[in-house]
Image (cartoon, rainbow, N blue to C red):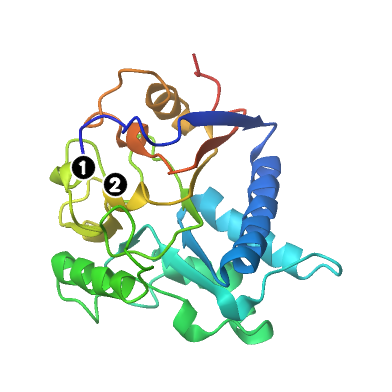
Amino acid sequence: MTDSPQTTLAAPRTEIYADKDQLVTVVAERLLAVLVDAARQHGDAHAVLTGGSAGIAVLSQVAELVAKPGVETPPWSKVHFWWGDERLLPSDDPERNAQQAHEALLDHLLIQHGLPEENVHRMATSEEAEAPPIGAEMYASELAGHTVEGGRNGLALPRFDVLLLGVGPDGHVASLFPGKDSLHVTEQTTTSEDQSPKPPLQRITLTFPAIHTAERVWMVVAGADKAEAASKALTQGTELTEIPAVNARGARETIWHLDQAAATKLR
């Protein structure tokens, strides 16, 4: 991997929505449609989830859609959920992305719709891994256990049909932060962060090479505090070390979903 986006990956396109609610509704509808199509085409579907207020709001909206009569849904026994990053905290800590996702959507699918527990691939908790590198290795093994034949771009990974990412005001995605060594990790699907500039300090994350294998990478960005980072990420020549989000690309599709507030500084 180089420090700039790979030219073979899908160039980003932007879609701007009136407000966060409209953004969340559209992304939720699209996510559900991708899961339906992937399960039909491949026999299973794999989605990578993100945390943050917008990312969790998308999951809450999916839960509302699933509850509506007549809405087409995938066979949940064929759907797998993964995470782009996680905080190394106790399993029930409300700051964990997985805990928030369970409350927003996954518990409902597990209890009411037959989603198998083994299809929810959570990253390690602090009870399971005493340090982030151990948690990263554990998740790499979990990913490898669901590798498609031949892997993905030489990496032991499942086929990610869609991968959701938020963007921090500093331009970070997943737990890949400006100026950190993790930005340059190659030939690994996961890595760790011991000194995150945003608490909590200890984290586990997918690497950029892993993110790049996803068929679709969808950014979900809401709020004026993200406007500067979004503008820089979508400006040619921005350095990866300054704004990691510049390197968030999918194999087939890269979409930046932004509300009006987050789009105010786009050039």
Outermost residue toward the front? 150
Q: Amino acid at mark 2?
A: Phe
Relative image position of residue 181 (x, y in whole percent)? 13, 44
**Mark in front: 2 vs 1:** 2
Q: Is residue 86 among the parts visible in the rendering?
A: yes
Q: Amino acid at mark 1?
A: Leu
Q: Quadrant of residue 231?
A: top left
Q: Residue at x 37, y 74 (%)?
A: 146
Relative image position of residue 204 (x, y in whole percent)? 26, 61
Earlier residue among tags 2 and 1: 1
Q: Are marks 2 and 1 in contact (CB under 8 Å)?
A: yes
Q: Is residue 107 among the parts visible in the rendering?
A: no
Badge number at residue 256: none
Along the viewing direction, whichever of 151 and 176 lies nearer the viewer:
151
> Viewed as shown, does residue 158 lie left or right of 44?
left
Q: Residue at x 39, y 36 (%)?
A: 9
Question: Which residue does the numbered mark 2 point to in the structure image?
Answer: 208
